[in-house]
Amino acid sequence: MARPDWDPQHLPDLHGRRYLVTGSNAGLGYFSTEQLAAAGAHVVMTGRSPNRLAAARAAVLRRNPDASIETLLLDTSNLGSVRAAAATARGGGAHDGVLLNAGIVHPPKEREETQDGHELVFATNALGHYALAGELLTTLAAASGRLVWLGSMSTTISPYDPVDPQLREGYTPWRAYVQSKIATSVLGFEADRRLRAAGVDVSSVVAHPGYSTSGRTTGIRGVNEPTRTTRFVDNLQAAFAQSKEHGAWPLVRALVDPSIEGGSFVGPRFGTRGEPRVVTPSKIVRSADIAERIWRVCADATRMPWPLEKAAKVRAAR
């Protein structure tokens, strides 16, 4: 059972722990990285832009000079980049957790495809993370680690059944985003079921940040620099919005709190804001039929099946 006394502002000592965070150069990924590092963890920051990644690393070190940080180039929309980054990450040893945070929040107006031939939003938010999680499964098993997938409140607002996850027809930016988050959440829950069934010592959890806005977030050079207009508009929503620092709380708790069980859904206490706690996911992301379908789509699209048997043997060999 999840601890009722969890304090997101006073994390347990994480010295000796190693975590990888995707999309850590800004937003939720950056603040999750900062919070993990402040508690003593070694964090592998990943992003697709070398300059933005360097700026984010510099910001973490300005605010916490003792932070243990390394950077790794990773573009989750590019399966070649995923493979290369995963190979490098595996060389660093066991991982206590991987936060699958990177994603497109503001999709393009028209449908776009990646160089691998997949719809951009689905590829970035779901396919790339499915592939990365599989590629890092043995390093997670070596540390009895955890996967955390980034969910969204949007899955309760517009519960589209992703019968066409690549959106070859009927593309809209909103539908692309919602379907990708449904797929991501479904993958997180289905991953935990499959890991348990295979005897792999890795848990999988889904977490969502509530309604977190940049205008209510600390200004940090090179990371979060909202305009005055953004500050004004976002502060008008103070009753139901929160900062990205607080939005990172559920993600970090899902990653490091041993009392959170695999298959859980972690989010803000009051839905859009508040302290992190175990909450109830929408019905659609718990659908076994959708889970089977999305898992098969991801396995076929990436041609990167998860090495469940190999990861199970890692546990047996420890």
Image (spheres, rainbow, N blue to C red):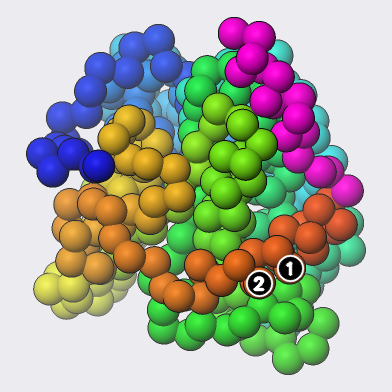
Q: Nearer the viewer, residue 169 or 306?
A: 306
Mark 2 sits on what residue?
289
Q: Amino acid at mark 2?
A: Asp
Vertical comparison of 90 with 225: above or below: above
Q: Amino acid at mark 1?
A: Arg
SS for tag 2? helix
Vertical comparison of 164 with 184: above or below: below
Q: Are marks 2 and 1 in contact (CB under 8 Å)?
A: yes
Residue 287 can be seen in this image: yes
Looking at the image, is mark 2 or mark 1 nearer the viewer?
2
Mark 2, Cα crowd under 10 Å, few <14 / some 14-19 / many 20+, is few
SS for tag 1? helix
Residues at marks 2 and 1, CA–CA distance in whole angstroms: 6 Å
Residue 166: give its label.
none
Who's the residue at 25% across and 68% down the image?
Answer: 272
Taking the magenta stretch, the answer to whether it contains residue 63 is: no
Q: Position of residue 171 (x, y in %)?
A: 71, 86
Q: Which residues are magenta?
A: 303-318
Vertical comparison of 240 with 313: above or below: below
Who's the residue at 65% across and 86% down the image?
Answer: 172
212 to the left or right of 238: right
Q: Nearer the viewer, residue 219 or 74?
A: 74
Vertical comparison of 21 with 90: above or below: below
Residue 293: give its label.
1
211 to the left or right of 206: left
Who's the residue at 66% across and 30% down the image?
Answer: 137
Quadrant of image for the C terminus: top right
245 to the left or right of 175: left
Q: Position of residue 31 (x, y in %)?
A: 35, 41
Query: Magenta segment, principal secondary structure?
Result: helix
Q: Nearer the viewer, residue 228 or 265?
A: 265
